[in-house]
Amino acid sequence: KNEVEQSPQNLTAQEGEFITINCSYSVGISALHWLQQHPGGGIVSLFMLSSGKKKHGRLIATINIQEKHSSLHITASHPRDSAVYICAVRGGGADGLTFGKGTHLIIQP
Amino acid sequence: DTGVSQDPRHKITKRGQNVTFRCDPISEHNRLYWYRQTLGQGPEFLTYFQNEAQLEKSRLLSDRFSAERPKGSFSTLEIQRTEQGDSAMYLCASSLTLDTEAFFGQGTRLTVV
């Protein structure tokens, strides 16, 4: 069973700061997802990646397969980025996703 | 297509009652997943379907839980004899194939009193 660890659990930053959220997993995977969850429960998929780096707007996701580690970066953070960011992986013998506990991000104006 | 939809959004039930939730995935998505999320935790996998076949079930899915996807389109998740520990957000997601992006519904928040 894959173990997914995220850090930090909580992060409060000022508007404009560069944000990094980290995710580590314990066994090999076929794909890693970064998800965003707003209050009320809705989950939005931000990235799915299996190698390298992806960029979408102010969001950048990277993954290092050898080190079993991924990072999500937010450039020029904005209060509307405030949400819970969740890392999830597929692999390790399971077809369903295994999720981290999430990082609760608050961006203050 | 409006994405993955779940019904109801909220459900309050008395302990011991049965409840049923519905998930309508994105059309043509073969894979449908059910997850459960308790407060302050990440979602946990419950079960998934490929078309109408239920291919994997988590140990979290006790005998009181049953899921169906009879025609390979919408799915239902039933909980019998609900317990307070069943209180959680139940999330449904669908994807076209195993390694494509997963799309999530808004979830059904269950409160057992």
Image (tube, rainbow, N blue to C red):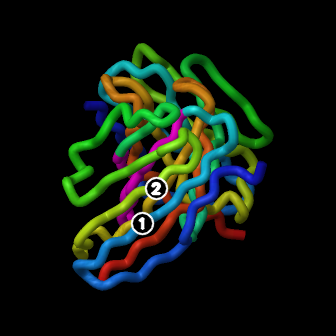
Residue on which disc 2 sits? B76
Residue A1: in magenta span = no
Residue on which disc 1 sits? B20
For this rendering, which residue is in front, B29 or A40?
B29
Residue B40: in magenta span = yes
For the point 23% across and 60% down, the residue is B64
Q: Is residue A86 visible?
A: yes
Q: Is residue A12 visible?
A: no
* Amino acid bearing label 1: Thr
From the viewer's perspective, is residue A47 above or below residue B37?
Answer: above
* Amino acid bearing label 2: Thr
Q: Is the same chain shared between marks 1 and 2?
A: yes
Residue B17 picture quarter: bottom left
Where, quadrant-wise, is the C terminus of chain B in this rendering? Answer: bottom left
In the image, the segment drawn in magenta is B31-46
For this rendering, which residue is in front, B92 or A8?
B92
Q: Which of pointers 1 and 2 lies earlier in the amino acid sequence?
A: 1
Tag 1–tag 2 contact (CB < 8 Å): yes
Secondary structure at numbered mark 2: strand
Horizontal relation, residue A71 to residue A93: left or right: right
Query: How far across and down, in percent of the image, does residue B87 sit?
Result: 33, 71
Secondary structure at numbered mark 1: strand
**Would you call the spot at circle 1 few (<14 residues within 10 Å), some (14-19), or many (20 or more)?**
some
Horizontal relation, residue A19 to residue B38: left or right: right
For the point 79% across and 40% down, the residue is A57
For the point 35% across and 41% down, the residue is A5
Query: How far across and down, in percent of the image, does residue B73 sit?
Result: 58, 43
